[in-house]
């Protein structure tokens, strides 16, 4: 397999990148968004040194992959089939499946349909329930300074998402909850600079807290009991996708392991790279 290149999956060009040899197996990683790109997950390539092949790709609609004009194709179900298409086209076989943020939601949906194709599941900075995420996000939002909350509320109500005051407030939120590392690495900044808003706005919506896209009622919590694969659930205690959401995952996925990292935000793989990758490596080596 080439270290990087393009695939055709579901009629769309998909960019992928791979590092390492599958001595101990292959980890297929799903990035956040929706509408993001794989770049910020490059710390996962550290696992290549431990004998794993790491395969990351840009989901269609974002990153270097093909843009999609038909917004009706921005659905969880289609992205599940895209994951399967990438796995089959690259002939990865049975994989360890990793998902971060939206990618973790996608990983759950994939595992519930294609459990036979995965040997383990890693869920990071994610949730099984958008309604519960909305509640938690509102609680986290109330911890922000009053002027930040006021700016977000004001300009979202006006639909003025390019106002400098609004952008400054969002930047404040991001540096408090998205990633604490200072300065942000270029790969992390690239995700926000290249974000595909048509995808994000269709599935989640344009707001910092409110979720009004086509995923607003998405909830697979009661289905998680079907999973029978080893599962690591990992998050930071300062993530806006809060530990409560991960405790709910842990409760509903039998035999799962929960790790809550202290002093770490949504960008756990950057805030505490060595420790984060170490938890993943320990979990995979224990299988």
Image (cartoon, grey):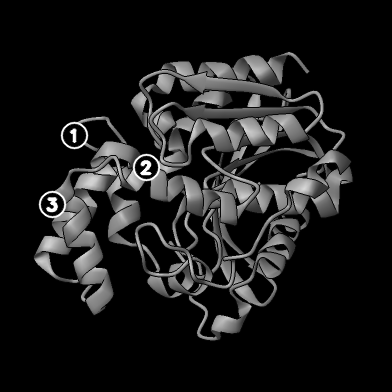
Q: Tell me the distance, in whole angstroms, between the alpha carbons under discs 1 and 2.
A: 23 Å
Q: CA distance from mark 3 to mark 1?
A: 24 Å
Closer-to-camera residue (22/224): 224
> Residue 213 at what x, y percent from top left?
52, 71
Q: Position of residue 245 (x, y in %)?
A: 57, 38
- Between label 3 and label 1, give the one nearer the viewer: 3
Locate residue 96, reporting x and y percent.
72, 35
Asked whether the viewer can see residue 62, the reply is yes
Sequence-wise, the earlier of marks 3 and 2 is 2
Q: Where does label 3 land, which residue?
A: 147
At 66% from the left and 77% from the top, the residue drawn is 11
Residue at 43% over, 26% down? 237
Determine which residue is flagged by label 1: 183
Q: Residues within 10 Å of mark 2 (few under 14, many from 20)?
A: some
Cα separation, mark 3 vs mark 2, equals 15 Å
Residue at disc 3, secondary structure:
helix
Q: Nearer the viewer, residue 263 or 278?
A: 263
Classed neighbour count for the residue bearing mark 1: other residues with Cα under 10 Å, few (<14), some (14–19), many (≥20):
few
- Per the image, the residue denoted by label 2 is 140
- Which badge, 1 or 2, comes first in the chain's sequence? 2
- Labelled disc at residue 35: none
For the residues labelled 3 and 1, say whether their Cβ atoms are less than 8 Å apart: no
Q: Is residue 163 above or below residue 174?
A: below
């Amino acid at each position: 397999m080439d270290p990087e290149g393009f695939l055709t999956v579901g009629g769309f060009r998909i960019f992928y990148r791979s590092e390492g040899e599958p001595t101990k197996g292959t980890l297929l990683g799903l990035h956040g968004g929706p509408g993001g790109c794989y770049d910020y997950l490059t710390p996962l390539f550290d696992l290549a040194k431990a004998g794993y092949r790491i395969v990351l790709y840009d989901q269609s609609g974002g990153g270097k992959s093909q843009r999609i004009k038909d917004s009706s194709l921005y659905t969880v179900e289609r992205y599940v089939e895209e994951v399967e298409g990438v796995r089959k086209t690259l002939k990865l076989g049975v994989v360890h499946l990793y998902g971060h943020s939206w990618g973790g939601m996608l990983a759950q949906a994939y595992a519930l349909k294609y459990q036979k194709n995965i040997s383990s599941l890693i869920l990071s900075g994610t949730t099984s329930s958008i309604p519960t995420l909305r509640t938690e996000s509102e609680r986290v939002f109330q911890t922000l300074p009053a002027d930040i909350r006021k700016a977000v509320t004001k300009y979202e109500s006006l639909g003025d998402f390019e106002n400098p005051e609004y952008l400054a407030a969002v930047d404040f939120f991001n540096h408090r909850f998205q990633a604490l590392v200072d300065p942000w690495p270029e790969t992390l900044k690239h995700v926000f600079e290249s974000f595909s808003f048509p995808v994000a706005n269709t599935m989640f919506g344009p707001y910092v807290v409110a979720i009004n896209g086509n995923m607003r009622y998405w909830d697979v919590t009661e289905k998680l009991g079907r999973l029978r694969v080893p599962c690591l659930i990992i998050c930071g205690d300062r993530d806006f996708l809060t530990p409560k959401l991960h405790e709910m995952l842990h409760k509903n996925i039998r035999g799962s392991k929960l790790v809550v990292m202290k002093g770490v935000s949504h960008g756990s793989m950057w805030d505490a790279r060595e420790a984060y990758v170490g938890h993943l490596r320990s979990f995979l080596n224990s299988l």
